[in-house]
Image (cartoon, rainbow, N blue to C red):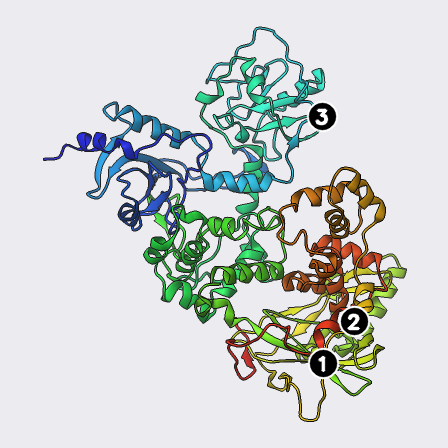
Amino acid sequence: MIIPMDLLRSNLSRVRIPEPTNRIFKQECCISFDTPKSEGGLFVDLNTFLAYGKDCVGWNYEKTGDPVYLHIKQTRKLVPEDRPSKKPTLLAIGIEGGFDNSEIEYEETYSIVILPDYITLPFPSVELPEKVRLAVDSILMAEGAERKEQVAAWTADTKQVSAYAMNLQQIDNGVIIPPSGWKCVKCEKRDNLWLNLTDGMTLCGRKNWDGTGGNNHAIEHYKETGYPLAVKLGTITADLEVADVFSYPEDDAVLDPLLAQHLAFFGIDFSSLKKTEMTTAERELDQNTNFDWNRIQESGQGVEPLFGPGYTGLVNLGNSCYLAATMQVVFSTRSFCSRYYTNQNLKLAFGTAPADPTVDLNMQLTKLAHGLLSGKYSVPALKKDDTANAATATETKQEGIPPRMFKSVIAASHPEFSSMRQQDALEFFLHFVDQVERVHAGKPELDPTKSFKFGIEDRFSCSSGKVAYNRRLDYILSLNIPLHEATNKEELAAFNKLKAQKTSEGKDVSADEIVRPRVPLEACLATFSAPEEIHDFYSSALKAKTTAIKSTGFTSFPDYLVLHMRKFVMEAGWVPKKLDVYIDVPDIIDISHMRSKGLQPGEELLPEGGPADEEESNMPIANENIVAQLVSMGFNQLHCQKAAINTSNSGLEEAMNWLLSHMDDPDIDVPLSQGTQCATVDQSKLDTLISFGFPEEIARKGLKASGGDIEKATDWIFNNPDASAASDMDATTSSTAQTPADAGLTDGGGKYRLLE
């Protein structure tokens, strides 16, 4: 007979005590969306600190052999039958804040589980080996990696080192702060307490608008003394990065690099403290993520909740509307459903994932697919019933699933998407398909992004009578909006007259009176395929610049056609303006007539290439002063020229920073005449600039002149309003040999139904 405690001791080599730098997952399974609230709870591997749901923990044991787990289970607390029902009261009379907190409360329990037989030992218990007790205590005290990474992204662009931290004055007045039992020295508050780092005074925080929080004693103390920095007690742990430090004169949350020293001055051993309160950033994040969007959808009307397979919602992560909308659309397509759901189960994806599945895109896409499509998490959320000890699930919304791990993986290589700023759905979609395509580089036949990819062919006809064709691949069809094709011109004219009249009277037009142009999608498609004049086109047949006619068509039709409307246009003075317009989209469109016919009998191609001096004249030139200063520092002449060019000659410091970060580039020693300036630009970046309203040719040249940097390309375009990129096309338009082939792409008939 195996004694459980002896079995645990025999497996102590597979137990580790986490360090402050370890990522500890304890809020969500890394393979599924199970949490401690799920029926089977959550199992934390005491060797890797990864968490698994009940259905997945066995797979981890099979793969790693790790047998010892901390089991975390959250169970809903029952409401006492004799508790009086609290309702919102007029002017908050009788209830602090005016409303009862209707959130369901949970009780958390722990145990040690040994696989494969799921032998369970209670925790806490003095009989457990010390190593196990220390490991579990460290896990429970630590900030979960899921939460920690989300808060870090939320504060990444805001927290700066305080100007007062490095030279902070601390007064030796004999104050020693105990490890617990804190209380405001001016009132009875025992939460939301702030320790002033100059004199050690423990005071309550600000009073919130709803009456919660503190009594303003900490800020009043600052006004009296001028002592600048305070740290929130209850947020201090062994990981000092989590601690909430506030600077009153800077009026912001800040970083204190000497926080350990400043705490030790008042006898605080931070390594033994446990986090008991949320930081200011966490409260802001929770307010943002928990905002109830239900009542502002569909013009304020309530909508009927749906449940079941394919009807799972995505939880707002604070700024993730763009991600949620994109992924809901992506996983409504057959290609992505088949790749990551129908043809790949969770166990298979986990089996091929690296040691840490939270950083594997294939695993996290499979997890997201099963979460969205299985229906397992598309169930009504529990709702508190004050009249009974039960939770009702009728007439309520679903909790949905939080795509934290997926967002972390897909955004890891992108500085914008890894932040908590609002983002553009189009740019995210292009980044997403690029990452998925990279993952499938070795097995393109499995790549689901092929269902979006299509071929485009531009035809150039110059006055010599000869033609050139240029092919490219794309994932989105970007369309201009021809306002002159609006179908409600009479209503627009009447509205503009009314608006002018009200403006002259100093009045505003009400929302009900606004009339927007209504442009048919067919007009946008017709504009895309209509012939266009290209001025200053260099003809290799005439050996001179001339005017060419450009027309565009499809070489293949994708399974799913993604449309992007260019709602940004450039007004006089290169001022961007967003169009306020409706696009009338029919349920079915037929674009089969937009197929390119290719080289026709009797057509003659333009000769290859163009004169060398024409190509050289369009190459950006490095600022000689910047280059000379860099060379004087000992840098290579060629490297200095590239640094100046790739920073748009913006200055010495910018060029030096670029140079130091690109010294190991494989093409750093390639001569400028063959360098990256003449290379093909990143199509996703080109599409982003086009969406801003820039002509494609100018956007392409701006990216080449700025080394592919979107922000610098935008500056370059504004500084070169007369730039023309026609000559940049000359070297590639005379034949299709240098353009990407569209072989292997799906090719339908060009008829599409709107996907809802």
From the viewer's perspective, is 642 left or right of 72? right
Label 2 crowding class (10 Å Cα cut-off): few <14, some 14-19, many 20+? some
- 182 on left or right of 568: left
> Where 497 falls versus 652 (above or below)?
below
Image x and y of residue 639, in percent: 72, 48
- Dot 3 crowding, Cα within 10 Å, few <14, some 14–19, many 20+: some
Residue located 83% across and 49% down the image = 623
Query: Who is closer to the viewer here, 325 or 240?
Result: 240
Residue type pointed to by label 2:
Ala
Name the residue that disc number 3 marks.
Answer: 249
Task: State whether residue 182 is above or below residue 83.
Answer: above
Which type of secondary structure does the marked residue at label 3 adopt?
loop
**Most extreme residue toward the left, as rendered?**
1
At label 1, the amino acid type is Ala
Q: Is residue 259 or residue 637 the one in the foreground? A: 637
**Residue at the spot of label 2:** 726
Q: Nearer the viewer, mark 3 or mark 2?
A: 2
**Identity of the residue drawn at 47% across and 64% down:** 331
Q: Residue 126 appears in which quarter of the rendering?
A: top left
Gap between marks 2 and 1 measured at Cα: 13 Å
Where disc 2 sits, the SS reads helix
Badge 1 is on which residue? 468
- Alpha carbon separation for disc pair 3 and 2: 55 Å
* Residue type at the position of mark 3: Pro
Q: Is residue 303 visible?
A: no
Q: Are marks 3 and 1 in contact (CB under 8 Å)?
A: no
Q: Is residue 584 above or below residue 619?
A: below
Please give the label number shown on residue 520. Answer: none
The mark closer to the camera, 3 or 1, is 1
